[in-house]
Amino acid sequence: MEIIISKDYDELSRTAAGIIRDQVTAKPNSVLGLATGGTPIGTYKELIRMHEKEGLDFSKVTTFNLDEYVGLEPTHEQSYHYFMHENLFNHINVNPENIHVPSGVASDFESYCRSYEEEIKGAGGIDLQLLGIGSDGHIAFNEPGTSLASRTHIETLDELTIKDNARFFDKPKDVPRFAITMGVGTILDVKAILLIANGEKKADVVATFIEGPITSQVTSSALQLHPCVTVVLDEPAASRLKRLDYYKWAYANKPKLAK
Ligand code: PGA
């Protein structure tokens, strides 16, 4: 894992967007895995700026989102369909036909989950997957106890996730109890991973998933098994890493390898 520590949220967002820009520039028809939540909003703002001011071109890009609440129509303001259009898709030149967000209102979820996996495979797999992390250590909606080999499935949300996400809804009881989510195994199949986390609230879980044991109780810890993971943190989120000084030194002194 490469750990990059930014001084604040703005720098983190610029760094993360820069990694996505480099991917899209190197491979214009990249398949990007995208995430929702508070954390990626700054990254998406920066990508929109790069599109508007620097001509970053998304016309050949394909996207797959991680998850969606079960029961929310795409037009619901708290659905992840709505979030992605508001915060990114409406402001860049991605082809609507290339956008994939799992449906929260499928009539047969079992076959729908299988077809989502097939669509990812059919697109050639995900080149770069953006991830946030929940305070319970989840990636996508893979709550504690989810198999580290899981594929796209319906997940029962943990109390902590419902509490964390209640801030987006009028009342805590409005937060859906179930979600459709890529599995941990689906995520481990992608070619490269970019995980972002900011704020002191994430400091404990960040230290746990990077430096703790691999366990299904902290599904993000499975990323230790992936060969190409970049973690971009701000100083508060990085503050409880035991080897903080090492990560900083290693990044600042990274040898420039000839291509
Ligand atoms: P957040 O959520 O970005 O709103 O903190 C992250 C997550 O639950 O994956």
Image (cartoon, rainbow, N blue to C red):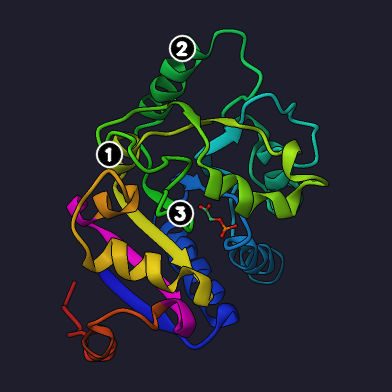
Circle 1 residue: 189
SS assignment at label 1: loop
Earlier sequence position, callout 2 versus callout 1: 2
Contact between labelled residues 3 and 1, with CB atoms less than 8 Å apart: no
> What amino acid is found at the position of numbered circle 3 in the picture?
Leu
Circle 3 residue: 130
Residue stretch in magenta: 224-237
Circle 2 residue: 110
* The stretch drawn in magenta includes residue 225: yes
Q: CA distance from mark 3 to mark 2?
A: 25 Å
Q: Position of residue 210 (x, y in %)?
A: 27, 66
Nearer to the camera, 21 or 114:
114
Lateral position of residue 115 relative to residue 4, left or right:
right
The quarter of the rendering in which ligand 1 is drawn is bottom right
Nearer mark to the viewer, of 3 and 2: 2
Q: CA distance from mark 1 to mark 3?
A: 13 Å
Splitting the image into 4 quarters, where does residue 6 fall? bottom left
Q: Is residue 150 above or below residue 32?
A: above
